[in-house]
Amino acid sequence: MRSNLLATLTGLTLAALLLPTAWALDEEAQAAKEKGMRLYNAHQRSLTTPYLEQAAEAGDVEAMYYLGEVNRLRHMGMNQAALEWYHQAAQHGDPHAMLRLFDGGACELGDVCPENGDDWPQEALELTLPKAEAGDAEAMAELYDIYYYVKEPDEDEAMKWLRRAAEAGHVESMNLLGEIARNDEEDYSNDTERLEAAEVWFRKAAAGGYAPSMNNLASVLNHLDQPEESWEWITKASEAGHINGRRWLAACNIEPDWEELTLCNSSTDPEPAKGWAILLAIHEEVPGTSSERSLRVYRDSVTQEQREEGERMKDEWLNLEPPLSYFPKKFGP
């Protein structure tokens, strides 16, 4: 495997001269990218490749990066295809692709290095820092990851830029600050303090339309014993396409009195047939072991008549806009 990677990566150095510059996609390529990203966000990654390849070959840098992610995740680690796509994205300036190349040892294994050195994280920093200093909120957020990868990682500098990104309106950064606060057992003396600190950031991002923060805010409010507002936000998360919000909507319509489902305490009058219809729609739109398990778990809580009514109602919940998504982070594990 190591020798194969070496041969592939060495070949990439020559291929770099032939890469097109990134440009705006035509209508067909844009539609392919949207289809590919919809599948990717729904964890249907085995189906994404032909769509993302069409966009990547038309010059879309984001599609190049996500093709790297698809191949890395499907193979539970770096492979030749992943490294090749990350390299193409890095040549077009994607800093996260540069960090993935560093993780994969591209420079060490195949002499696929930045043009002016051998340090991909430093290249990412030098590319991104001027953009962040010029006010680019996305670049500010990227610096959070980059500062953990440079030769002398700087957590304080990383957090400074994450906060600046959040203050500049970057909702993903707001959400991350909320997650950091929620898990911070050093700076907060008890669970209530952590949850209240997290609530501030989740609420800001949720107000900005970010579905993961709507879902997180609902959870925090539920733990803070505010079930009415918690239900409002889980409903909004469902409407924004968050799959967890949609699952809660189904569960609370089928089993609102389960002791474990305290979030359902403020839900409207339960409609088991509606809950079953939602579960069927989820399973058709985002098939997998999770949706299969939900159908098994709740089947005995719904009568035959309710299941039949749910079948008739299913299309009302199928392929809504925005589509169902797990909202995976761009630079996740």
Image (tube, helix red, strand yellow):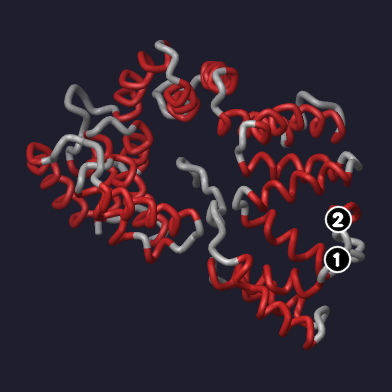
Per the image, the residue denoted by label 1 is 270
In the displayed structure image, the side of residue 81 where residue 234 appears, left or right: right
Which part of the image, by quadrant, shows the N terminus? bottom left
User: Which residue position is annotated with label 2?
Assistant: 267
Residue shown at 87% from the left, 61% from the top: 260
Above or below — where is 178 with respect to 7? above
| Horizontal and vertical percent position of residue 200 | 74, 27
Q: In front: 168, or 112?
A: 168
Instruction: Assign a secondary structure to mark 1.
Output: loop
Along the viewing direction, whichever of 297 and 124 lies nearer the viewer: 297
Question: Looking at the picture, how far across and down is residue 54, in whole percent?
Answer: 24, 54
Q: Nearer the viewer, residue 87 or 107?
A: 87
Q: Amino acid at mark 1?
A: Pro
Residue sticking out furthest to the bottom: 304
Relative to 248, 55 lies left or right: left
Q: Residue at x 43, y 19 (%)?
A: 136
- What residue is drawn where x is 54% and y is 48%? 327
Question: What SS does tag 2 mark?
Answer: loop
Residue 84: which numbered mark, if any? none
- Residue at mark 2 to residue at mark 1: CA–CA distance: 8 Å
Counting other residues with Cα less than 10 Å from the Cα at mark 2, is it few (<14), some (14-19), or many (20 or more)?
some
Determine crowd level at label 1: few under 14, some 14-19, many 20+ residues with C-alpha closer than 10 A.
Answer: some
